[in-house]
């Protein structure tokens, strides 16, 4: 018998002895830790390489590569990295627990069939929501429905996606509240960061205004803003006036639309409103004198104020005839 064979025989005898079981458990835990560490490093390096590659391509040739596509690659890669990291940790923990149980109590390995049946029943009843969350999270990331940095509407909360986990998606709303949304509970998802967006502005002008002059002024103002060097890159198409949106006894509502990049919609809308106000003032057009009533509504768990426009006649109380009961 060679020296190597003698060494292996000695190691085998030691592992079968009194200290064999604790040593095997320790080796299993150490191996699980090392494997998880290696896989986490690999995932981080792959994510980092994809992100750096997308940034290099965008900076090298911005004329032929869409900045939006590069950003989507970065966001999707970060989301996939987070989901893969959580999935790897979950699988390693489950396998480690099974191996430790088999090492500590070898007799339990014969009962693994019963354990498997019980686990299946648990997944079918008690843990079905967890499975639903995991599968839905993988599907959302795999289909590029959302990514880290996207502005989304999940039905429960609207805000910026900070993290996409294997079971939970974290969304930070405009008030700074961090929402933890279960992936399985997201039945519809509105992504406000993909492709393009549309600014819709409906100013109300007095009924006796020169509608053609007002429409031309609104269009000229929007076109002048599009030609501005600051806004030229974010306004994708020529602004359009769609015409009269509604007519009432007090005002006429005219609709102006501008197609913009998804992330610049709010900035464009604010600037355009300010310019329209200045242009309409110069034209001598003033907003109709309507009375406003502030109504408290409750939307998605957040108190919100809505303005209902009413005339003085509508606001005045109706007196009952004298003697009426």
Image (spheres, grey):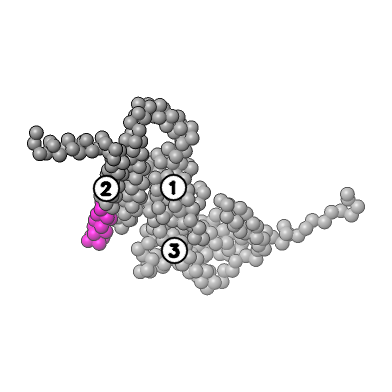
Mark 2 highlights which residue? Answer: 34
| Residue 173 painted magenta | no
Residue 224 in percent (x, y) is at: 41, 67
Can the viewer see residue 308 in this picture? no
Q: Secondary structure at mark 1?
A: strand
Q: Nearer the viewer, mark 2 or mark 1?
A: 2
Measured as percent of width and height from the top left, residue 225 is found at 41, 67
Q: Which residue is mark 3?
A: 268
Residues rendered magenta in the picture: 45-64
| Secondary structure state at the residue bearing disc 2 | helix
The quarter of the displayed image where residue 302 is located:
bottom right
Q: Could you say whether the residue bearing mark 3 is in a helix, strand or loop?
A: helix
- At a point 12% along the width and 36% down the height, the residue shown is 5
N-terminal of the pair, mark 3 or mark 2, is 2
Q: Nearer the viewer, residue 9 or 53?
A: 9
Identify which residue is drawn at 51% across, 49% down. 156
Q: Which residue is mark 1?
A: 168
- Write the residue at 57% across / 69% down: 285
């Amino acid at each position: 018998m060679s020296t190597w064979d003698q060494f292996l025989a000695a190691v085998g005898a030691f592992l079968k002895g009194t200290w064999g079981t604790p040593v095997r458990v320790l080796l299993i835990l150490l191996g699980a830790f090392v494997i998880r560490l290696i896989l986490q490093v690999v995932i981080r390096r792959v994510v980092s390489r994809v992100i750096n590659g997308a940034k290099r391509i965008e900076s090298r040739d911005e004329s032929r590569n869409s900045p939006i596509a590069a950003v989507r690659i970065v966001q999707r890669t970060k989301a996939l990295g987070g989901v893969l990291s959580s999935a790897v940790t979950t699988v390693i923990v489950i396998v480690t627990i099974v191996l430790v149980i088999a090492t500590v109590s070898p007799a339990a390995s014969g009962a693994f069939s019963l354990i498997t049946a019980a686990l299946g029943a648990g997944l079918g009843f008690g843990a079905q929501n967890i499975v639903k969350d995991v599968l839905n999270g993988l599907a959302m990331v795999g289909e590029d429905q959302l990514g880290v940095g996207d502005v989304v509407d999940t039905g429960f909360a609207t805000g910026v996606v900070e993290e996409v986990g294997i079971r939970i998606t974290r969304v930070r709303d405009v008030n700074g509240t961090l929402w933890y949304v279960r992936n399985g509970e997201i039945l519809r998802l509105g992504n406000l960061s993909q492709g393009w967006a549309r600014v819709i502005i409906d100013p109300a002008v007095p009924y006796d205004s020169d509608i053609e002059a007002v429409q031309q002024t609104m269009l000229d103002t929007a076109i002048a803003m599009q030609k501005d060097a600051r806004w030229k890159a974010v306004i994708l198409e020529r602004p359009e006036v769609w015409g009269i949106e509604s007519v009432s006894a007090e005002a006429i509502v005219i609709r102006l639309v501008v197609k913009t990049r998804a992330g610049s919609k709010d900035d464009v809308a604010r600037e355009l409103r300010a310019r329209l106000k200045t242009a309409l003032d110069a034209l001598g057009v003033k907003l109709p004198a309507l009375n406003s009533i502030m109504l408290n509504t409750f939307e998605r768990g957040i108190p919100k104020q809505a303005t209902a426009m009413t005339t003085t006649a509508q606001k005045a109380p109706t007196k009952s005839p004298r003697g009426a009961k």
